[in-house]
Amino acid sequence: MFARSFSALLLAMVATALHAQEMPSLADPSATGMPDADGRSERQSGPALTLDDILGLAMQANPALRGAQANAAATDGALMQAGALPNPQVSLLQEGFGGLERTTTALVSQVIELGGKRSARLDVASYGKEAALAELGGRAADLQARVTDAFFGLLAARRQFQVANESERIAARFAELAEKRVWAGKASPVDATKAKAAASSAQIELANAKTRVSMAVEKLATLTGSDLVRARDIAGDLQALAPVEPLSGLLARLDDAPLTRMARAEMLRADAAISVERAKRVPDITVSAGMKHVVTGGVSGNQAVVGVSIPLPLFDSNKGAILEATHKAEKAEADFDGEKATLKLALTQAYADYSSAAQEAQRLKNNVLPAAREALDAVSRGYELGKFSFLDVMDAQRTFFQEESRYVQSLNDAQVAHAELGRLVGARLPSGSFPTTERY
């Protein structure tokens, strides 16, 4: 009896040691043979790129951001042109071409704008520049959020690869073990068939996970517009979740958000356009000054010429343009109110998404995963000792890796929501660590 108990204990200790060798910790990427972008386990030369490095590359090379920068720079020209004064005109009038009788008149004319036309144009151009700068800030915030999403998406894809890699190795080990138990007459051939099917399924999932890593690299490289992302590894912590300020504080920051400033600038520009159209109702004055050279009977003389020209607004008082500008201003004001409401709703939703995902990740890591890991370890040892069926093994294995994938997805969802909060307020929110345990 003692010898039988001692043999069973020794067998359990050996199985535990083998199990520990076959199941490395997911917290150590090097232990799982994590591939780079093309699926190789070897790292490319050069230092790993951090999120700050990749954001810097994107700000320099992204085509959409460069286009927004050019559009903002173009408003300098519009503002310069809006302040330009009308050019003077030079005219020459010749009456008669004979040597004894002729008159030559040379005039210089200048339009004098009245009604505040130039000031109104400058207001429109100034608000247009403000709108373009706000749009540039919005594009930068959007690019920052998209790059951050892609960065953590790549980290999540690599973490999912680690999960699939461990699942594949465990499934292969159990397939081999089931085959040995069948040959020893300790298990049904059905167990071996099921184990082989599970191993094949794990291999397919591993291949799919490897493809998702490659696609995540391509997405990040496309967003940054740089090939360095393909040539180097990235360094980041998917589990580093930052606590954010209360929702009330984030909502207060929406007044200075790029999208709010852009909608406000468009509203003010539309209001200024009304002033431009109203100023056009006031006719401009054209003053002229010059000299008339008169030759009469061969005798020449010079006379000064001064003139004033004022158009009479009898048929066109610009009422239609004023009406159009007024309704456009009303639309811009409605768009501004709608944009504020939309941003408030989007920020509230992103805040809820972040809180929910962060809490789910914490619960999974602190409570669910340790229990699932413990159950898998116990069932694995019990199967090797003949205490559990292979169905029990498959169920425990499936539960553990499903929860692992769910944990990674929760982390990714939280990082995406955190980046979305930064996009909406127009600033990158501080990063930090969410308190978790070391082992799960």
Image (cartoon, rainbow, N blue to C red):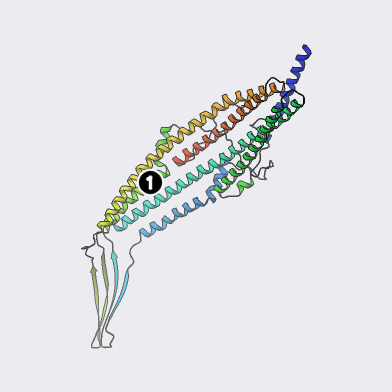
From the top left corner, tell me how far across and down residue 94 is, in percent.
28, 80
Report the number of discs. 1
Q: Residue at x 37, y 51 (%)?
A: 127
Q: Residue at x 29, y 50 (%)?
A: 327
- 360 in relation to 117, above or below: above
From the viewer's side, name the closer residue of 371 and 228.
371
282 sits to left or right of 186 = left
Residue at the right extreme? Answer: 3
Q: Position of residue 334 (x, y in %)?
A: 33, 45
Q: Residue at x 68, y 42 (%)?
A: 40
Q: Quadrant location of residue 438?
A: top right
328 left or right of 145?
left
Extreme top residue here?
1
Q: Who is closer to the viewer here, 44 or 170?
A: 170
Label 1: element kind: helix
- Can the viewer see residue 143 in this picture? yes
Residue on which disc 1 sits: 263
In this image, 117 relative to 9: left or right?
left
List the single residue furthest toward the left. 314
In the image: residue 140, left or right of residue 260: right
Residue 198 in percent (x, y) is at 66, 32
Look at the picture and state if 333 lies above or below 178. Answer: below
Disc 1 packing (10 Å; few <14; some 14–19; many ≥20): many
Residue 202 occupies which quadrant of the picture? top right
